[in-house]
Image: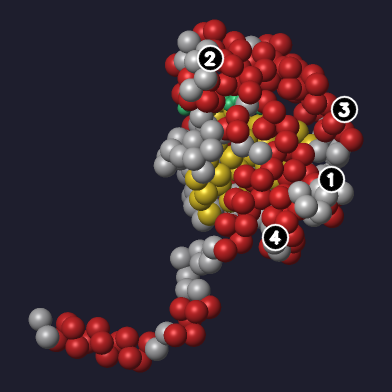
Amino acid sequence: MKALFEVLQPGDPDFELAGTIDPHRLPKHIAIIMDGNGRWANRRSLPRVAGHRAGVGPVRSTVETCARLGIDVLTLYAFSVENWKRPRAEIETLWRLLRFYLGKELPELQKNAIRLQAIGRLEALPPKVRAELEAVIEATSHNRGLRVNLAINYGGRMEIVDAVNGIIERARLEGRLDALRVDEESIAAQLYTATSPDPDLLIRTSGEMRISNFLLWQIAYSELYVTETLWPDFNPTELLKAILEYQKRDRRYGGLSREGLNGARPDREENLIEAIVSSR
Ligand code: FPP
C-alpha cells in the first residue's frame, strides 16, 4: 500500500479513505465486470462506442491503483463469448480500443512490473489483435508485480467444458481413460485461471445483479460488490470503497463466524430440535 500513499496528498479524499483500509487484509485477487459503457453514452446522447472509449481510462487507473495497493491479481471482463452478438462496428471498436490500450500501455506495465495475461478462447480473435496481445503477454511475462488477467472471448461455462475436455484428452493420451475420475482439484487445475487464487472480491458496475457467465467456478466463495456507478465513471475512490466494504464482510466459507461459534450451544440446540420434532 505504501506506493499508493506516494501519489496521494493529505487532504485528498482518497488519502483519508486509503488510511481506513487495513493493509494486512487486502483481497489478493479482485475481479471486475466492467458494465454500463452503453448507458453512460446513451445518457449523453452519444453513440455506444463513445462509452467504450471512455471505459479505457478507468481500466488504466484501476490497474495502476491495484498495483500501488499491492494486489496480486486483477481480472477484468473485457469481452464475453456472448458479446459477438453485438453490431459488427461495436465489436471492431472494442478490438481497436484493446490494441490502442496494449500499444500505449506497455511501457507503463513494464515500469510497474505488471504482468499481462489473457483468459478465454483467444484463437477466435482477429489475427492482429491476437498477435499484439500475445506480444504484450510475452514482453511482460517476467514481471512479478500485479498480474492482470484480461478475460477476452471468455465464458465461464465454456471454461469448465474446456477444462473437463482437457482432463479427458490427457487421460486418453496417457491410456488411463477407463479409471478416470474427475474431482474439484483436477478441474481447478485445468481452468484458464489455474495459476491464480480464486477471486476474493468480485465487483460489478452499473447496478446489475448478475454474474453474466463470469468465472463461474472461481467465484464460489467470492464476496460480491455491486455499485450503481457506470464503468466509465469508475475511479480509484470507487475501488477503495469496494475494498473497504470487502474488509467489513465476515467470510465464513460455509462454516460459522467466530461470533457464531462462541454462541453455539450444541447441547441446547439438539434439545430444541428434539422438542420441535416430538411436538409434531
Ligand atoms: C460492458 O458495457 C462493457 C463491455 C462489453 C466492454 C468493456 C470494454 C472496455 C471497458 C473498454 C476497453 C477495454 C480494455 C481492456 C482496454 P455495455 O456495453 O454492456 O454497457 P450497457 O450494459 O450499458 O449497454
Residues at marks 3 and 1 touching, judged by CB atoms closer than 8 Å? no
Residues at marks 1 and 2 touching, judged by CB atoms closer than 8 Å? no
In this view, the mark in front (3 or 4): 4
Where 238 sits versus 271, above or below?
above
Residues 211 and 209: in front is 209
What amino acid does circle 4 point to?
Ile
The residue that label 2 is drawn on is: 46
Q: How far is disc 2 from disc 3 in space, using C-alphas?
A: 31 Å
What amino acid does circle 1 point to?
Val
Disc 4, SS: loop
Q: Residue at x 61, y 12 (%)?
A: 93
Q: How far is disc 2 from disc 4 in space, using C-alphas?
A: 37 Å
What amino acid does circle 3 point to?
Pro
Disc 1, SS: loop
- x then y, percent, for residue 1: 80, 54
In this view, the mark in front (3 or 1): 1
What amino acid does circle 2 point to?
Leu
The residue that label 4 is drawn on is: 21
Left/right placement of residue 265 relative to residue 258 reads: left
Left/right placement of residue 12 relative to residue 58 reads: right
Q: Residue furthest top?
A: 89
- x then y, percent, for residue 90: 54, 12
Query: Crowding near pointer 1: few (<14 within 10 Å), some, many (20+)?
Result: few
The residue that label 1 is drawn on is: 7
Disc 3, SS: helix
Name the image quarter holding residue 106.
top right
For ligand 1, give the image quadrant.
top right
Labelled disc at residue 107:
3
